[in-house]
Amino acid sequence: MKRLALLCALLAANAFAVASAADWKMDPTGSRLEFAATFEKAPAPGVFKEFDARLRFDPDKPGSGALDVTIDVASADMSSADVNAAIRGPEWFDFAKFPRAEFHATEIRRVGADRYLARGKLSLKGATQAVEVPFKWTPSADGATMEGEFVVKRGAFGIGTGEWSATDVIGADVNVKFLVRLRKGR
Amino acid sequence: MAALILAQIALGLAAANWHLSPTKLTLFFWHKSTGMLILALALLRLLWRLANPTPVLPAGTSAWERAAARASHAFLYCAMIALPVTGWIVNSAANVPLKIFHLVPLPAIVAPDKATENLAALAHFWIFTLFAALLALHAGAALRHHVVKRNDVLTRMLFASPGRE
């Protein structure tokens, strides 16, 4: 009985220790994950409607943080029926074979007053690449907001294969932009 | 302008028939850019035509010839405007981004909608078909003026000298 009490105390202490590093859950309302490719030098914007982010983060001790994002790739919407029909195919995102993308970062550091940089790995369409995600952290009354943008090379993930790997018509760079609303909680 | 229109027809036919590839998109990009240029030039031309006296037809042109010339010219003007406009509707309804000649972003004139896109594409095709037929007639009639009737209509078309009787 005594040992059980001790175990409970230890577990509670442990839980408290993890919670103090602040766990954050995404509030899908108001959170956005957008991307912009280019077509003949004009921006071709799109959005992933379904995604989720989990974060362990203390703005004053970012070193102990971690960020995990899962993206439902098949929720990609480029607001054109023709384009949406094209990107689901094997030459582009290949929804059938690779419906999910993930980003995991275990290295977060401060780079400015409210600016941070998460270094991690992005797995998309069967390829995993190191990606640096800069973000701005804004605490609010009921949680916090992280937002930022970065560029990925579509070729590194085989997005656009065969003839489509040429970058003069559809550009090599894809700008990814996110705004994530977070609430404290497990 | 005639050269632009002929190039535009070639671009449009090539783009429509090419298999889906970057080349097809590039052909469409130039077709759309050229189309917007033609629309601007056609509107200027129409204003010019309304502001200036119409070139006088040679004496001895019969009534049916005058009517045919009038009708076909009216249709050619309509098509020079309707073809780019229906193309613009197709592009807007398909919600495809476009920067004309990589320079000017083209605003959408209708909301994205597949039915609108299909309808406008059908109109674009049929106006084009009539336009191509009228263009052949227009060129044939000009040649007839030059070769058969031996007057200066074709020379006037190629080297404008307005005001000459």
Image (cartoon, helix red, strand yellow):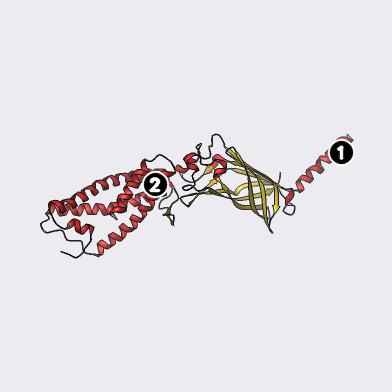
On the question of residue A61 being in view, the answer is yes
Residue at the right extreme, as displayed? A2
- At label 1, counting other C-alpha atoms closer than 10 Å, the crowd grade (few under 14, some 14-19, many 20 or more) is few
- Of the residues tagged 1 and 2, which is closer to the observer? 2
Residue situated in front as seen by the camera: A21 or A116: A116
Q: Quadrant of residue A49?
A: top right
Q: Going by the image, does A2 lie left or right of B46? A: right
Chain containing the residue with disc 2: B
Q: Quadrant of residue A82?
A: top left
Q: Identify which amino acid the numbered label 2 is placed on.
A: Leu
Position of residue B159 measured from the top left corner of the image (x, y, whole percent): 23, 60
On the question of residue B113 being in view, the answer is no
Q: Residue at x 48, y 42 (%)?
A: A164
Question: What's the distance in space between the residues labelled 1 and 2, CA to CA?
Answer: 75 Å
Position of residue A93 measured from the top left corner of the image (x, y, whole percent): 53, 39
* Marking on residue A6: 1
The C terminus of chain B, quarter of image: bottom left
Q: Residue at x 33, y 55 (%)?
A: B38
Q: Residue at x 63, y 47 (%)?
A: A131
Pointer 2: what residue?
A: B27
